[in-house]
Image: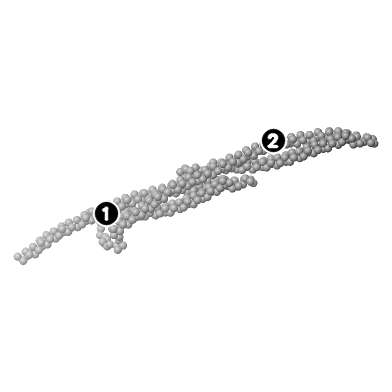
Amino acid sequence: MKGRPGTTRLCRNRFSSTTEFLRLSALVDKSQKETTDKLRIRSQLIGKWKNTLENAIKAMADEISTMEVERIKLRKSMVVLGVPESIAKECIEKRATRPDTELVRDQVEEELVNELALIAEIRRLLMKTLDDFNSQQVENRTARQRLEYDWSDKKESYEIDTLNTGLNNCSRTIMFRPGAVRQPPEQASEKYWEHFSMETLDECEKCRLKSVALRNTLNSTLMNAARDIRTQADVVEKALTSRINCTQEAVQRFENDLKNILQGTADVENRIEQMKRRINSFDASMKVAQTRMDNRSYRPNVENCRDLAQQELIDGVHTIQSSVSALLHELEEAERVKTDLVNSRARLEREIMLKRRSLFIDRERCMLMRSYYPSANTLSGAAVS
């Protein structure tokens, strides 16, 4: 009878132990299943974030590549900008060699100076834009690096949680890990983790959108710059063409005047020769009159008187002398006219020579150089390879 209570307790203990084991085993299995489910949910969440980061990294990498293409395009546009600048400078230098009175600050000169000023202003604008592009590329690469760091962390975390999700009591890699339950004091909360992940994406997206906006302004900047340069180039060429036409008209007018002067000079020279012949034609009459008077001076004694014949001879000589004097005066006047015409001819020939040299510089040098002026497409980078 005394041994029966011990047996009862033994049986009760056996039953209780078995029951408790089953209950605790079920509780542990349930906890492990819930943990597995939470790890699966967590790994799926991290996987989504990882995929989102991958898309963001790809978008940022594409933006960096596109920005680099646009940056190279901008740099080449700045190189092309040197062509019109060199043309304008060389035109000014060539026109500075215009001779004498042709060396004036005309409309062409003013427009060439304006062209150089415009090109310098556009170069400053493009330099500032290039600096903005360089700074933005630094920001873009920093943002991509930040995304890549976060993606790398999430990839590692995703792999760890995926591995943990697959662990069970039969796994070969499970073992006791002393201290694994300790929580590091610097461990972040899930709320902060989500805030950090969202902030990283938001900041990088803002950076990308800023880059897109800057890139979108480049085309308009280059197109406006190219349009302004081409417009000013057209103004210069219009002024140059007008100057060439004006110079050609002046040369034609001077050549016509020179032709008239040459004809006038020939006429005057003919008149001079004619006057000289006419003057010489009075020599015979003078000789006759003087011979008669000399012969009559030999009349003897009282016969040598001043009779009517003598008076007529004297008057005849005076008439011849006055006629010769009048013709000599006309001859002198004709000689002065000839001298004036010769001087005018020299001035006209010099003016024609100066204007032809100026015309050569404007038409054969400047216009030839400006025929190599880049198009608007080339200036904007559209035709730059």
Find the residue positioned furthest to the right. 301
- Report whether 134 appears left or right of 313: left
For badge 1, the amino acid type reads Arg
Q: Residue 26 falls in which quadrant of the image?
A: bottom left
Is any part of residue 144 visible from this angle? no
Q: Quadrant of the N terminus?
A: bottom left
Find the residue positioned furthest to the left. 1
Q: Nearer the viewer, residue 153 or 339?
A: 339
Query: Where is residue 226 drawn, in percent x and y?
Result: 48, 45
For badge 2, the amino acid type reads Gln
Q: Secondary structure at mark 1?
A: helix
Find the residue positioned furthest to the front. 308
Q: Nearer the viewer, residue 134 or 18?
A: 134
Query: What residue is shown with label 1?
Result: 42
Query: Where is residue 121 drawn, in percent x and y?
Result: 50, 51
Residue in the picture at 11% in, 60% down: 15
Q: Secondary structure at mark 2?
A: helix
Is any part of residue 268 visible from this angle? yes
First-in-chain label (2 vs 1): 1
Residue in the picture at 35% in, 50% down: 56
Residue in the picture at 69% in, 40% down: 345
Query: Where is residue 208 drawn, in percent x and y?
Result: 38, 51
Q: Relative to 17, is 112 above or below?
A: above
Query: Where is residue 283 drawn, in percent x and y?
Result: 83, 35
- Report whether 236 appears left or right of 339: left
Query: What residue is shown with label 2?
Result: 263
Q: Residues within 10 Å of mark 2 (few under 14, many from 20)?
A: few
